[in-house]
Structure formats: C-alpha cells, structure tokens
Image (cartoon, rainbow, N blue to C red):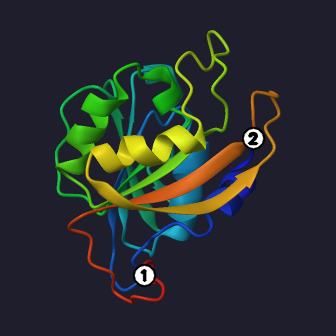
Amino acid sequence: MTTAEARTLLGQAPILHTRPNRWLELGCGTGTFTRALAELLPPGSAITAVDRDEMALHELPAMHNGVRITALNADVQDPLSGPMDGVLLANVLHFVEDKEALLARIAQVVPTVVLVEYDTSRPLIPWVPFPLPRNTAVPLFAKAGFVEAVLLGERPSRYGNGPLYAMAFFARNHKSINPSNPWT
C-alpha cells in the first residue's frame, strides 16, 4: 500500500485541527500509515511510532509534512505513556492474541483509537494469526471503554484475506468539539 492509499483510508480520521496533536502509532513497521497520519495532522504535531523491528524504524523520517516523528524500538505490549490525542493501530491487532488487555491499557492514555484491520475471521498464518473482523471489533472496543465507533472507510486487500477497514473508536471521556462532526 502506498502512503496516498493509506491517507485515503484514514481520510476521515478524528483529528483535532485547532492545535498540534500528539499521536502514538503501535506497530508502525516502515511507516506507510505513519506518513499518512502525518499528512492529516496539523503542522507542529508529533507522532511516536513504535515497532519492535529496529530495521523497519530506520525507514521513518524524523519529520514529515511538518509533523515530528519519533521512532521507538519497543513491543506493542510494552507500557504506554500518555496522555495522547489518539492511537493508530494499523494492521497490528491481528498479531496480538490478548487484545482485551492491550485495549484496556490504551483506554487509560487516549480518548481516540483509529484501527485498520482486515475484515475477516479466517487466520492467515503468519500474516494474520489473530484476525479482528469489523463485527468483532466494535464489542471488543466497547468492553475496553470505547463507547462510540465510526467506520472511516474500506478498500480491497491485495492479499485476499478480506477487505481492509478503518474505524475510529471514542472513549467514554471523549468530548466532541463539534457534536455534528466530532473530528473537526
């Protein structure tokens, strides 16, 4: 996937445009979705991009589109620090077996999560060992305290393991800036 394709998938992401944002991306890989998020954030924002593959992190720029990107070599299961405006989980939860524990920890530091996953329940080893179809994601996030879910978009997958979908989840303590459009 290209950065432009990822940006299109995330295009309706809940981003506050009135001030710089602080986002965390868990499982950033080489940064396709990191760059896409940076292109959506206002200048002066910051992304902490986390991955356990140190070589992949070397492909991340320190700055993209006026957004500072800090690469952090860690596992998505490592402790999180906050507060942050949001967390991006792009193609990473299908590698996490205990999703409930991770989402409970995320809910403690952020009001908003943007999720990108394959809409399938069929595992595809080794790439999608613990799939998270859309109909399972909503109740899973609700259990962690994310009470509102919004579909941002979807696109066909090149790998044939269900289409990719993007969703935003909002925690109980999320306060909409504009009730008719909470991400403006």
The amino acid marked with disc number 1 is His
Q: Position of residue 115 (x, y in %)?
A: 50, 48
Viewer-nearest residue: 53 or 154: 154
> Is 99 left, or right, of 2 in this rendering?
left
Q: Write the residue at 54% across / 55% down.
A: 167
Q: Estimate how packed mark 1 is, as few (under 14), some (14 to 19) or many (20 or more) residues with alpha carbons within 10 Å.
A: some
- Report the mark closest to the observer, 1 or 2: 2
The circle drawn on residue 163 is: 2
Q: Write the residue at 48% across / 42% down.
A: 137
The amino acid marked with disc number 2 is Pro
Vertical order, 84 against 44 (above or below): above
Q: Estimate how packed mark 2 is, as few (under 14), some (14 to 19) or many (20 or more) residues with alpha carbons within 10 Å.
A: some
The circle drawn on residue 17 is: 1
Q: How far apart are marks 1 and 2 (CA)?
A: 29 Å
Q: Write the residue at 47% across / 89% down.
A: 180
> Is 93 left, or right, of 142 in this rendering?
right
Q: Does the image show residue 2? A: yes
Q: Where is residue 154 in the image (x, y as percent from the top left)?
A: 71, 53
Q: Does the image show residue 65? A: no
The circle drawn on residue 136 is: none
